[in-house]
Amino acid sequence: MTEPLTTTPVGTSGTAPVGIVGTGYVGLVTGLALAELGHPVICLDVDRAKVTALRAGQAPFHEPGVDDLLARHGGRITFTTEPGDVFGPCPVVFVTVDTPPGPSGDADLSRVEAVVAAIPAGTEVVMAMKSTVPAGTGRRITRHLRATGRHGVRYVSNPEFLREGSAVHDVLHPERVVLGADDPAAADAVAALWAPLGAPVVQCDVASAEMVKLAANAFLATKISFVNEIANVCDAVGADVATVARGMGLDSRIGAAFLNPGIGYGGSCFPKDVAALKQLAGNSGYHFQLLSAVIEVNELQKRRIVVHLANRLGNLQGATIALLGLAFKPGTDDLREASSLVLAARLAAEGATLVVHDPVVGDHVLQALPAGTVKVARAADALAGADAAIVVTEWPEYLELVRPGLAASMARPLLVDGRNLIDPEAAATAGFEWVGVGRPDCLPDALAEPGLDLDDVEADAPAPVAGR
Ligand code: UGA
């Protein structure tokens, strides 16, 4: 058996170190934020390769600001695979392991259970749960700890609300800190760590804190599915969802955030947490009907774009389609539940050939994409010869594609903007036939003129005409 990678002793400065178990997005960014606030931090992970890389200053994922914090706080944050480096030396330990969906739709808590099992008898610690867990988990863990004689472990639910792509900013500028605990002193110990950030604190019982997290994610996902359905109705009646969303969002009771329609939400959180809340309700005897619709709308939205394409190109058999963006959102290389993967599989099933681009996702993605998919390093190269291009992830660099000449490099200058990223008129001016989500199509002037052939369209066509 390989020896664990242990830390050198930390805490000699007199300040007790804070422990982190699990160095994924939440764990690593939480640890770096605490280091930024001046605390010595010890991060525990079971993945030796990850720990070795982190010790060398290499983050296991792309996230703005993380490399910089790792470089600046290398002396204050240490990494280990040995539980004894964390349980014992650290009065507060954050649990930040992942809780992926299990086969039944319930959250798989095996990694959380493994952490609980690793806490030695006699340990005095405040265990602050940041992993997203079903309501009731804290109560069950506390009961289990008591039953196994580990009376020194005090449980606090401290859910995390960071978003990938802006994780460092979100952790250092929280809109609220939620602390659920039966023991007020334990909650105070965690509150003290976050106090310098000045966020409002919601102090409550454990189950309510757990529910805040699930309800917040489910509500945001509901907002997205709602605006996606509004976009689909806009398509049907010839309205513009951008105007509708703006008109809705200015009502402070509604708010403008999360009203961007697109090709569905993805990532490691919304799909999992919506399913987990639905399942949790079902397990408790309550049928959460609304969430069933939220999930179904999201699935249909990923596929809807294939219908848009087929309507315009006819048979997709043999068509070359460029996918612009693969990550589930900009600012990350995360592919978990990314709409791009579903879209690629559907297009390949229709007989299309795929050329893909993403500014940060590595070539390993090809293993998850249909056979024969080509990945190119420059977005402009994906357009060359394509029958259509689809903006799948709203990376800001795709705005630069809207310039004269690129449309002419395509077999057909059809730009399907799955995230409503690009200004339709600018796209049409640059010679693209722009098709968005819930917005009127925008064609180059010449395309809108009857009797003109597509081949006659100049790349730098004059002012656009909006129309369907
Ligand atoms: C989400 C929540 O926003 C965080 O508050 C939460 O902490 C996190 O889940 C979690 O539970 O860990 P994240 O998944 O990183 O964060 O990303 P979001 O920015 O919320 O985007 C999620 C998905 O929704 C993306 O696929 C995005 O493209 C999509 N989305 C978002 C839309 O389609 N429309 C919108 O208006 C907003």
Image (spheres, rainbow, N blue to C red):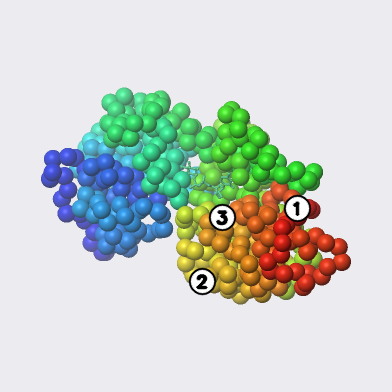
Q: Nearer the viewer, residue 113 or 100?
A: 100
- Residue type highlighted by circle 2: Ala
Residue farthest along the front direction in this orientation: 462
Choose the circle earlier in sequence order: 1 or 3.
3
Dot 1, how many residues are within 10 Å of its Cα: few (below 14), some (14-19), or many (20+)?
A: some
The mark lying in front, picked from 1 and 3, is: 1
Residue at 48 percent across and 32 percent down: it is 212
Queried on whether the Cβ of the residue with tag 2 lies below 8 angstroms from ligand 1, the answer reads no
Measured Cα–Cα span from mark 2 to mark 1: 32 Å
Q: Where is 206 relative to 383, above or below?
A: above
Queried on whether the Cβ of the residue with tag 3 lies below 8 angstroms from ligand 1, the answer reads yes
Dot 1 lies on which element? strand
Dot 2 lies on which element? loop
Residue 150 in picture, x, y percent from top left: 27, 35
Task: Examine the rendering and report whether any part of residue 12 can be seen.
Answer: yes
Residue 399 position by quadrant: bottom right
The label on residue 394 is 3
The label on residue 466 is 1
Residue 346 in picture, x, y percent from top left: 68, 62
- Residue type highlighted by circle 3: Glu
Quadrant housing the N terminus: bottom left
Q: Where is 313 relative to 147, above or below?
A: below
128 left or right of 295 in image: left
Residue that label 2 marks:
377
Residue at 71 percent across and 49 percent down: it is 439
Q: Nearer the viewer, residue 249 or 110?
A: 249
